[in-house]
Image (cartoon, rainbow, N blue to C red):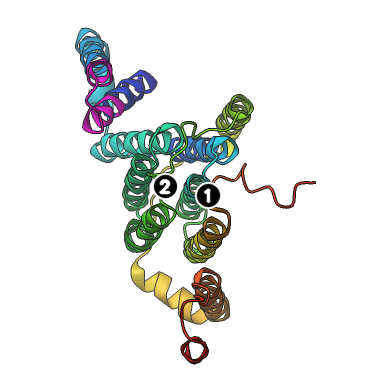
Amino acid sequence: MIPLQQVLVLSALLFSLGVYGVLARRNAVLIIMSVELMLNAVNINFIAFAVYLAPNKVVGLVFAIFVIVVAAAEAGLALAIILRVYRNERTANVDEVDLLKW
Amino acid sequence: MEVLFGVFAALAFIAALRLVFATNSVQTTLAPLLVLLLAGLVFVVLSHEFTDTISSLHAPQVVFYMVGGLALAGGMGVVFANDLVHAALFLIMTLLMTAGVFVLVSAEFLGLVQILLYGGAVSILIIFALMLTRARETQALRLNGPQWPFALVTGGGLGAVLILMVGRVDAWKGLTDTTYKTINDIGNALFDTYALPFEIASLVLIVALVGAIVIARAEETPELPAGQAEQR
């Protein structure tokens, strides 16, 4: 019913919004949110291609499940690191955490 | 015409959302209201242009425009909002609307997984992180770094290139989804063909989450007596 291209355009727009967010934001949690946005766009792409281009296979759907799992693990780990950085540095802004900057 | 339709819908959605999150000042309340009125007015004036388009639309397609427009509005909210908590709420909206997109392209199991994992777990995790880093109290005046114009050029350029490429691939034109993969099929594939990757994924998840607990765990507080600190 829905043309494939419209789904792809939606995911492309979401992905570029996520890229903008990752590059522009200062707060680490906001950067994680933008990364989630990009992972979501990738998932839309996987599922759209799985449903439209490979009608007899479920590989794309299974891969999308793996992407969701890895995204959940990544979010948990990244937020733990942000918490630890906040506790040590009293800030969650990535431009103020410059211990490795020479 | 569909593009105009979508733009008006997205504008109206954004204006409505801005109204919901409006602060007390006059211009932040009135400006979205004006945009909403303007979008409605333009839509009414041009509605005779749309009649052919509207009558040719199928119901799933209309729902897709609404859900996709809301997802895009939420995505814009995440990257353009001036408040961390509003950005988190916009993210939840985008994630749930993405679940709607999954259901619309007949992958309803993924839609359910999306609601459970993203709408439930990940969004709660993010809101907790905002709370524990005292994001609202210590919120900087600028949420964007000085590099944001370059980020805008990069993101906009990437989006333009991707959309142009989507339009150029002839093999994707006119494709519509016809297959209907049941939860049975996915379950069989997961526990039969992809059993090993599935187990490895669960291992990755547990290692990552145990690691997260170890990293985020509070250090031994010096106030405690030595014996108690060792017992923990």
Q: Which residue is mark 1?
A: A92
Closer to us: B43 or A59: B43
Establish if B168 lies above or below A47.
above
Q: Mark yes or no: residue B173 visible.
A: no
- Residue segment shown in magenta: B14-32
Q: Position of residue B98 (x, y in %)?
A: 37, 48
Q: Is residue B21 magenta?
A: yes
Mark 1 vs mark 2, CA separation in Å? 8 Å
**Labels 1 and 2 in the same subunit:** no
Marked residue chain, label 2 = B
Identify the residue at image location x=49%, y=55%: A50
Closer to us: B224 or B100: B224
Looking at the picture, which amino acid does disc 1 mark? Answer: Ala
Marked residue chain, label 1 = A
Residue contact at pointers 1 and 2, CB within 8 angstroms? yes
Establish if B18 lies above or below B181.
above
State the predominant SS element of the stretch in magenta: helix
**Does residue B128 appear left or right of residue A73 in this picture?**
left
Quadrant of the frame with the N terminus of chain B: top left
The secondary element bearing badge 2 is classed as: loop
Q: Which residue is mark 2?
A: B135
